[in-house]
Amino acid sequence: AEGIYPLDLCILVVPGLYPNLQELGDYMGLSLNSDEVQRNLAMVPMGDNRVATVPSALGGMVCPVTGGDMGVRRAEIKQGLREVILCKDQDGKVGLRLRTIDNGVFIQLVQANSPAALAGLRFGDQVLQINGQNCAGWSLDKAHKALKAAAEYRIELIVRDRPFQRTITMHKDSSGHVGFIYKNGRITSIVKESSAARNGLLTDHNICEINGQNVIGLKDSQVKDILTSAPTAITVTIIPKFIYEHMVKKMSSGLIRSAMDHSVPEV
């Protein structure tokens, strides 16, 4: 794997900064000799935050993930909860459609150029609270009524980022491909020994985002254009097919294509 070096090539010993392992020996009952360290830390990453991997018979490179990659930053699914403050537009709307799944409330649609889009809400986000009220167990009608009844200038939401989705970062090969085939936004097959295969992309999953940009509802040709124009490292956000189908249930493909926010998020 690229960027991987044995421990003895990666550590720079600066006099006075680090203790001599041979002198420590059996410090406080710990075995700190060089052989023991090398057995437990056989491989370490380089200094550019690349993920350390052990070489295998598969060969090829697992895509390096760095904090500076814009696609990774735009696609990040953050852990924990966040607060989002919304206001209504001149029509008294926030630009959201909701969906209930397993007694939870989720965002089914974020309209382009709406207060919800400007606040950074995304398809698949889970809404846990609306103005201090817990949404667990709410019906869809109750959730929409809570938004409608909220004050015009301040609606407080507590949100969890896209719990049903995950991101996969891959590298284009010399021909500009990452190694998967899709139809109607759904991944149908993975190319053997490709970056998609090495990085764990799965079939029967729908593509939600490419480098953080929502592609739900776009034609396959439009998705292809986004993939082609993307840089070498591509981060794809996917969701299992059966969950996706439940999320978009009762929404026409035309509505998704025309109303969904497909803008590139700012970071």
Image: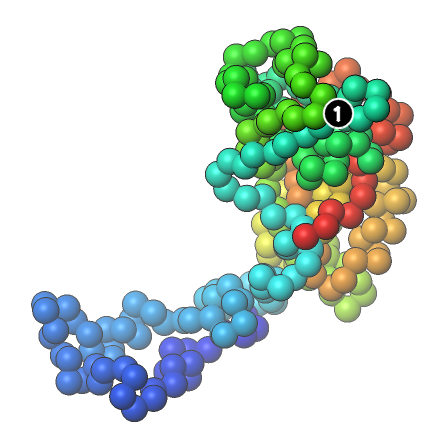
What colouring style does the render use? rainbow
Residue at point 51%, 36% (across, down): 81
Horizontally, residue 143 falls left or right of residue 25, namely: right
197 vs 139, nearest the viewer: 139
The secondary structure type at the circle numbered 1 is loop
Q: Is residue 197 visible?
A: no
| 238, above or below 13, in the image | above
Q: Return the x and y of residue 49 as percentages of the image width and height.
A: 52, 67
96 vs 131, nearest the viewer: 131
Task: Give the total number of marks visible in the rendering.
Answer: 1
Residue at point 80%, 53% (across, down): 227
192 vs 227, nearest the viewer: 227
Q: Return the x and y of residue 152 as percentages of the image width and height.
A: 72, 21
| 31, above or below 107, in the image | below
| 133, above or below 210, in the image | above
Q: Residue furthest bottom?
A: 15
Q: Return the x and y of residue 5 as percentages of the image width and height.
A: 46, 78
Q: Which residue is mark 1?
A: 88
Please tell me in which quadrant of the rendered image residue 11 appears: bottom left
How many C-alpha atoms fall within 10 Å of the one at disc 1: few (<14), some, or many (≥20)? many
Please tell me in which quadrant of the rendered image residue 160 appears: top right
Horizontally, residue 33 falls left or right of residue 261, namely: left
The kind of residue tagged 1 is Lys
Horizontally, residue 50 falls left or right of residue 125, namely: left
Query: What is the quadrant of the N terminus in the image?
Result: bottom right
Residue at point 20%, 78% (across, down): 33
Please tell me in which quadrant of the rendered image residue 242 appears: top right
Q: Return the x and y of residue 171 as percentages of the image width and height.
A: 68, 61
